[in-house]
């Protein structure tokens, strides 16, 4: 009975992703844009509902480098700290489940991966790049360069800039920001092309939020539960995992997006659970 409930729950992931996409870009709720979300969402988009935590953290780092986080800019300092708090809260409660169930850009990569071509898996070390990107491009580089380093190349942000400036893209590439526009557009094209034959390449290798939330998978409220005593290590759950993770050996792997595809094999020894 529990396995059937889990299977029904997993089948609703696409519905959850679709609703999250619509809610995250629902202009009528844009008054909530001061609230940071726990996944990647470009809040520079005019339709955006929530604030991207990375934008707020980068702005906080820049203002800190300028010595401007005093009383006048206490609101800005609060939003940067609030972004860290939201990410920690999301991580503690759900781990990386927001990546697998809520992130619009992750959803886009999932859809591209459904194109029927030969698939490849990234090497295990690929996931170790995300946390250094979070520290380097979201905190240190903005602090020392006073430049929104990650936001300038962020793929969802690039999509936002391209559609908002579609009529003037050729001219935009010639502006002083044109080099960043070309670089970010190239990164977006590479990521979307790679997503056709690799499961979530951006999420696996480059996403700072996924790297940060992955630290909490070992302690998060939602976790993959394995009956180690009954498991015969048949490998079916590993074959089902989009990230190539073996849930039996590393159920709390930092690259796991909690998509729960491993539980779709209907093995009675694997499922999801909640720590109380």
Image (cartoon, rainbow, N blue to C red):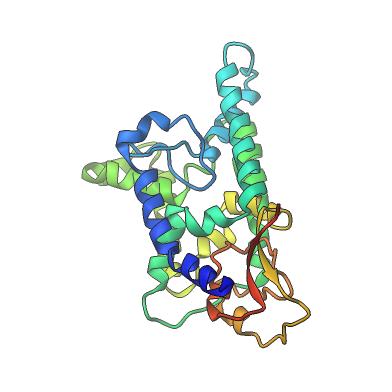
**Vertical placement of 258 versus 27: above or below?**
below
Give the number of callouts.
Answer: 0
Q: Residue at x 60, y 46 (%)?
A: 90
User: Which residue of the protein is positioned furthest toward the front in this rendering?
Assistant: 1
User: Which residue of the protein is positioned furthest toward the right in this rendering?
Assistant: 229
Q: Nearer the viewer, residue 9 or 195?
A: 9
Q: Nearer the viewer, residue 166 or 199?
A: 199
Observer able to see residue 182? no
Determine the image quadrant of residue 193: bottom left
User: Which residue of the protein is positioned furthest toward the left in this rendering?
Assistant: 167
Q: Residue at x 57, y 16 (%)?
A: 73
Q: Tell me where residue 175 appears, x and y as whole percent.
A: 34, 37
Observer able to see residue 124? yes
Q: Tell me where residue 40 appears, x and y as whole percent.
A: 49, 48
Determine the image quadrant of residue 107: bottom left
Query: Where is the N terminus found, in terms of image quarters?
Result: bottom right
Q: Tell me where residue 18 appears, x and y as whole percent.
A: 37, 56
Determine the image quadrant of residue 26: top left
Q: Is 49 positioned to the left or the right of 246 in the image?
A: left
Q: Tell me where residue 249 appears, x and y as whole percent.
A: 74, 74
**Vertical placement of 174 versus 219: above or below?**
above
**Vertical placement of 192 versus 3: above or below?**
above
């Amino acid at each position: 009975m529990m396995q059937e409930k889990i299977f029904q729950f997993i089948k609703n992931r696409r519905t959850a992703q679709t609703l999250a996409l619509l809610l995250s870009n629902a202009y009528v709720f844009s008054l909530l844009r001061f609230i940071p979300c726990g996944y990647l969402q470009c809040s520079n988009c005019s339709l955006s509902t929530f604030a991207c935590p990375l934008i707020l953290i980068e702005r906080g780092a820049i203002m800190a480098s300028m010595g401007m986080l005093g009383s006048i800019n206490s609101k800005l300092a609060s939003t940067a700290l609030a972004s860290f708090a939201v990410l920690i809260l999301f991580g503690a409660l759900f781990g990386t489940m927001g990546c697998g169930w809520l992130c619009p850009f992750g959803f886009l990569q999932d859809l591209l991966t459904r194109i029927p071509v030969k698939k490849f898996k990234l090497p295990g070390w690929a996931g170790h790049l995300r946390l250094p990107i979070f520290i380097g491009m979201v905190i240190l580089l903005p602090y020392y360069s006073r430049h929104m380093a990650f936001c300038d190349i962020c793929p969802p942000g690039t999509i936002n800039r391209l559609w908002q400036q579609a009529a003037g893209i050729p001219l935009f590439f010639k502006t002083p920001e044109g080099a960043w526009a070309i670089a970010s557009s190239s990164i977006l094209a590479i990521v979307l092309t790679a997503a056709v034959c690799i499961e979530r390449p951006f999420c696996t290798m480059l996403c700072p939020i996924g790297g940060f939330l992955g630290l909490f998978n070992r302690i998060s409220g939602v976790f993959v539960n394995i009956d180690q005593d009954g498991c015969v290590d048949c490998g079916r759950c590993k074959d089902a995992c989009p990230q190539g993770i073996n849930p039996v050996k590393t159920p709390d792997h930092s690259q796991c997006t909690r998509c729960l595809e491993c539980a779709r094999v209907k093995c009675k020894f694997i499922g999801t659970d909640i720590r109380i």
